[in-house]
Image (cartoon, grey):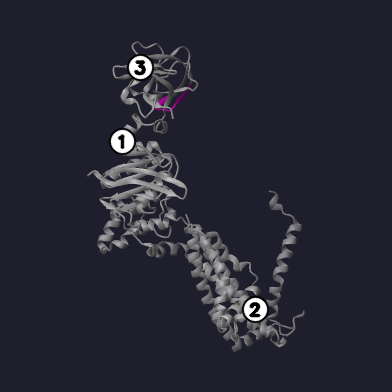
Amino acid sequence: MSASAFITIDHVTKRFGPVLAIDDASFEIGRGEFFSLLGPSGCDKTTLLRMLAGFEVPTVGEIWIDGQPMAAVPPYRRPTNMVFQSYAVFPHLNVRQNVAYGLRVEHLTREEHKRRVEEALALVQLSGLAERRPNQLSGGQRQRVALARALIKRPKVLLLDEPLAALDKKLREEMQVELRALQRSVGITFVFVTHDQEEALALSDRVAVIFDGHVEQIGSPRAIYDRPTSRAVGAFIGSMNFFPAAVRGKENGALLVDCAGLGTLAVPESNRHGAGKPAMVAIRPERLRLADQRPSGAAAVPVKLISSAFLGDRSHHLVGAEGLPQPIMVAAQAGEVPPVEGPLWLVADPSSALLFPED
Amino acid sequence: MIARRGNPWLAAYAVSGVLLLYAPIALLLLFSFNESHYLVFPMKGLTLDWYRRMAGNTGLFSALRNSLEVAAVASIAATMLGLLGAKAVTRYRFPGRAASIGLVMAPLVIPEIVLGTSLLAFLLAAGLNLSLGTVMLGHVLLCAPFAFAVLSSRFAGFDPSLEEASLDLGENGLATFVRVTTPLVLPGIIASLLLCFLISFDEFLIAFFLAGTDQTLPIFMYSQLRFPKKLPEVLALGTCVILSSIALIILAELLRRRGSGTEQ
């Protein structure tokens, strides 16, 4: 365990009967970190979160929070609080009673109790709605109640289980900004479960990508996006073009790769991932460029435009290259509309190309 | 709008069905005000005499008190058992769960006469004296499946993360049960109490087998039928019982609806 580790997940495995939910996970989360568990829909990420909260017990392994082993600690004695996916706002209590729910066991004086409740309500901007019943609130307001109810406990760790999934896009983006600002202001460690990769990238200090109960990669959003260490992570985060490829040789610390549809690229050796022979080149759509004249000094291949999608701030073009069955996606700034008629050249940035072995 | 126009035959059929069901009860109500002892038309005239006589019948009131006592104890005990059982089968997965549900619900399909006979044989073999206590025991058995069914649907209808949220916020299992579970299933608890109370209150067979010398109200009413002169008095009593039953059922239904209305 390193000195900076605030939460340590030490070889944790969780089985539900024959189902393996979490497969030997080991990682650490730092104090005050905004840490996301990201993966496609499935119960594995939530299971990990529920083990932190104490609702599930690891089949194997140990979880430490702030230096304490959690195995024998029931949920009601853990220094964690949770924002549930369904919010779990108590329907029989009003907003104020919901927010104050967890204070009973803290045995505060009446003034202190009142002050803490007002503070928590103000923190999530619900002061004006304190007497409302949950069924009179919108989804976003209910979520704020759930947040305030957890934060009023001043937990060491706040656990959030897909808290934004039920909100519409606009509100979700607003809440993302608020959540991030909130985390900075309270300074609490946040562990955030989501299946939305954009959300994870936008909010987190670090992200753990989890597939089928297995932790695939942990890193900063930028590292996860720019340097995925496996083909699966690259395909899951953002858009990615894949080209069958074969290494031909080495030159100045770069691998010369014959790449179907892209010609020969000189890929830095550090971009090579995974054990086994590289057989796949991956390039992000924004690392590809279309030109209407053959550029000098860069490797370029002739392509045909298949279709274009205008997305406002940018456009996605699908182009076809000889020797490649599937179309290639190219992201371009808005306004850069390629001519539909006439020849087009596809230029790749080899320094951002990644090499993976065959699956 | 085909449904709006309606079929006159269908309407007539429906009305006659309802009449057939409720005419006997209407007759009971009607003849409880009849001046004569005999249930024949034309009626002799209206009177409140039978109600007055009923009010002066001490045997009736002791039977009524017995029935209220049995129904109160049986409904509370059955509801408590139902509450625990419903919580168990809706919140936990355990071996024998399906079998447990089957066993709790079994008294619904076992003929009461069989239930009564076997309970009688068992209690006598166990050396217990028949009393109101043994009737209560039998009624708990009979009411438990109803309490269990009402409360299970109530438990199934609310999000288990509400209970987890309470644990997460520092309340232990017992405090969570008091602060979250109970208020949320309260409408179900009240509905179950009312339902079990009514079932126990007008139950005849098991009470007849297990009552010993104490009479419950249904047994008392049955015994009165042996005297033709007492018949109108029984009709008056029956009318009172029916009206209070209807009031209770309506109350239970209102509570159930109000409860489910607050769900998110």
Range of residues picked out in magenta: A307-315
Give A305 or B29, whichever is nearer the viewer.
A305
Q: Chain of mark 3?
A: A
The image shows residue A209 at horizontal and vertical percentages of 37, 38
Query: Which of the image's four quarters has the N terminus of chain A?
Result: top left
**Secondary structure at numbered mark 2:** helix
Q: Residues within 10 Å of mark 1 (few under 14, many from 20)?
A: some
Q: Residue furthest front?
A: A276
Please tell me if label 3 and label 2 are on a single chain.
no
Which numbered mark, 1 or 3, is in the foreground of this view?
3
Residue A300: x %, y % from top left: 39, 14
Query: At x 37% / y 44%, what residue is drawn?
Result: A24
Query: Is the stretch drawn in magenta largely helix, strand or loop?
Result: strand
For badge 2, the amino acid type reads Gly
Residue A25 part of the magenta-drawn span: no
> Which chain is indicated by disc 1?
A
For the residues carrying marks 1 and 2, which lies nearer the camera in this image?
1
Q: Position of residue A125 (x, y in %)?
A: 33, 49
Measured along the vertical axis of the image, is residue A217 above or below residue B13?
above
Indicate the secondary structure of the residue bearing disc 1: loop
Q: Which residue position is annotated with label 1?
A: A220
Which residue occupies the extreme left position in the image?
A: A3
Do marks 1 and 2 both belong to one polypeptide chain? Answer: no
Three-letter code for the amino acid on which mark 3 is drawn: Gly
Indicate whether B141 appears above or below A221.
below
